[in-house]
Amino acid sequence: MLFSTKAEYGVRLMVELGRQPGSQPVSLGSVAEAERLPLSYLEHLVAKLRKAGLVTSTRGAHGGYRLAKPAAEITMDAVVEALEGQIAPMECFHDTPEGKVLCSHESDGDQACSTKLLWMRVQGGVSKALAGTTLAELVEFSTKSEPTRAAALGSVA
Amino acid sequence: MLFSTKAEYGVRLMVELGRQPGSQPVSLGSVAEAERLPLSYLEHLVAKLRKAGLVTSTRGAHGGYRLAKPAAEITMDAVVEALEGQIAPMECFHDTPEGKVLCSHESDGDQACSTKLLWMRVQGGVSKALAGTTLAELVEFSTKSEPTRAAALGSVA
DNA sequence: GCCATAACCGACCTCTTCAGTAGGATTTGA
DNA sequence: TCAAATCCTACTGAAGAGGTCGGTTATGGC
């Protein structure tokens, strides 16, 4: 598997928040019930999302979470990265300060890294998919009727 | 990380085999030395590649491994899948007999799977990158000079 | 026929991550 | 003051990663 349930649960949580219309916060308990996910595990995940600045929280009674930005401005690369950590195809890929990607195998001597071309392409494909999908899209997709969804998926494959 | 070192080591092993010109088999020991990888671990990986029909082996003295097909006919989706298992973004994705992809969360009731659109796009991006890269490309890439490699990578990003 | 060299096979081991659980502390509206 | 909520830390069982080790089988060369 490329990703763990952290990404799965976390994205579902975000969609659930995005579904709510008003500005009042929604409690984790209600999200856990709606998605049938363990509340205490969701607490860990939402903490990551909060630290990444994707959701805001209000404590105390009638508190809960809401999106920190409009759903249309939240791209899934930020969400998945907050939940899963750095998205790189391979351990040897590091983020340099300039935002580029290096392969640590290249430093040792004359040998070229024979896998770099491959992982760069994979990285590009994943990044494009994640950065090109907004939370608003997922919210809209999940509320549509089945035939409409099937049509949307057809254009992907 | 999207993939483990199984994919990394395995791909390097395949490239090493692809580099050899002749039809005589190359021993795992020489590959391990060239790539500085543990021989006994490579044995496990090459077993997966052999079972997937990507390499053939000859036993005994002066034995070893060679590619089962020309490098240009080996695409990296087969290699990575042999090493890492089914490439799916998420646990809930299954391969159906028709070769399609289903989300197991959809079966339970009325609720649409809010993450399906996202994972389909990710899946598509990864598949495209893996299936669109041949072993021959990696072999050629790894033997070129540094400026040529940089130019090739530039067109990816 | 022996022997070095290889592929093959399975068991084991340590470490880290995953997927939670548990228990509490803190904040806040009613 | 109470209940409802976030917040925080620690713990746990299971699984996988990344090997290691020992032994078995096959084969070419002397």
Image (cartoon, coloured by chain):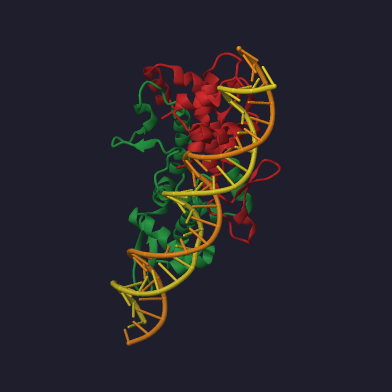
Chain colours: A green, B red, C yellow, D orange
Location of residue D9 by image quarter: bottom left
Q: Position of residue A106 (x, y in %)?
A: 37, 27
Query: Residue at (51%, 44%) from the top-left corner?
Result: A2
Q: Position of residue C15 (x, y in %)?
A: 42, 49
Q: Is residue A156 visible?
A: no
- The C terminus of chain B sits in image quarter: top left
Camera-side residue: A110 or B26? B26
Against A106, residue B96 (above or below) is below
Camera-side residue: B145 or D18? D18
Q: Position of residue C1 (x, y in %)?
A: 69, 22
Query: Residue at (53%, 42%) from the top-left corner?
Result: B121
Query: Residue at (39%, 64%) from the top-left corner?
Result: A65
Question: Is A85 left, or right, of B62 in this rendering?
Answer: left
In this rendering, the count of numbered labels is 0
Camera-side residue: B27 or D25? D25
Question: Is A26 left, or right, of D24 in this rendering?
Answer: left
Query: Residue at (70%, 41%) from the top-left corner?
Result: B98
Location of residue A46 by image quarter: bottom left
- The N terminus of chain B sits in image quarter: top left
Q: Is residue B40 visible?
A: yes
Q: Position of residue A75 (x, y in %)?
A: 42, 47
Against B94, residue B126 (above or below) is above
